[in-house]
Image (cartoon, rainbow, N blue to C red):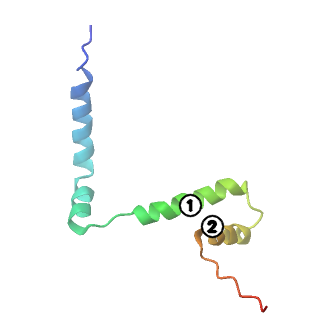
Amino acid sequence: MAGNGDWLPLFIHSLGRTLDRWLNEILNHHLAGASNGSTEGINSCLKKVKRCGHGFKSFENYRLRVLLHTGGVNWPKRPS
């Protein structure tokens, strides 16, 4: 019968392979302090807009929706 700790060696082996594969990237992150978090955030926002759009008829409409949701639209002021 399998004991409760049988999964641990497999997990440690998998973790070791992952760390070995990503060692340069992990070290570079800690040395340079760089992150792709802002890029991932923008990508997440774009995907959310695309999901809510249910298929845009034109790229221009999609572009305008993205600009609207990201605050990148500077609407001209109307004279009062």
| Residue at the extreme bottom of the image, as rendered | 79
| Residue at the extreme top of the image, as rendered | 1
The residue drawn where x is 27% and y is 36% is: 14
The residue drawn where x is 71% and y is 87% is: 76
Query: Does residue 14 lie above or below 49 as drawn?
Result: above
Alpha carbon separation for disc pair 2 and 1: 8 Å
| Residue at the extreme front of the image, as rendered | 80
Q: Amino acid at mark 2?
A: His
Quadrant where the C terminus is found in the figure? bottom right
Q: Amino acid at mark 1?
A: Cys
- Mark 1 falls on what kind of element? helix
Disc 1 target residue:
45
Q: Residue 43 in the image: x percent, y percent?
A: 52, 61
Query: Does residue 56 lie above or below 5 as drawn?
Result: below
Quadrant of the rendered image containing residue 74: bottom right
Q: Quick check: 28 left or right of 78? A: left
Disc 2 target residue:
69
Q: Quick check: 44 left or right of 16? A: right
Count neighbours of disc 1 (C-alpha within 10 A) and say few if under 14, some if 14 to 19, many if 20 or more: some
- Mark 2 falls on what kind of element? helix
Q: Which mark is residue 77?
A: none
Q: Quick check: 38 left or right of 34? A: right
Residues at circles 2 and 1 in contact by the CB criterion of under 8 Å = yes
Closer to the chain start, of discs 2 and 1, is 1
Q: Residue 59 in the image: x percent, y percent?
A: 70, 68
In front: 67, or 1?
67
Quadrant of the rendered image containing residue 1: top left
Q: Residue 31 in the image: x percent, y percent?
A: 20, 65
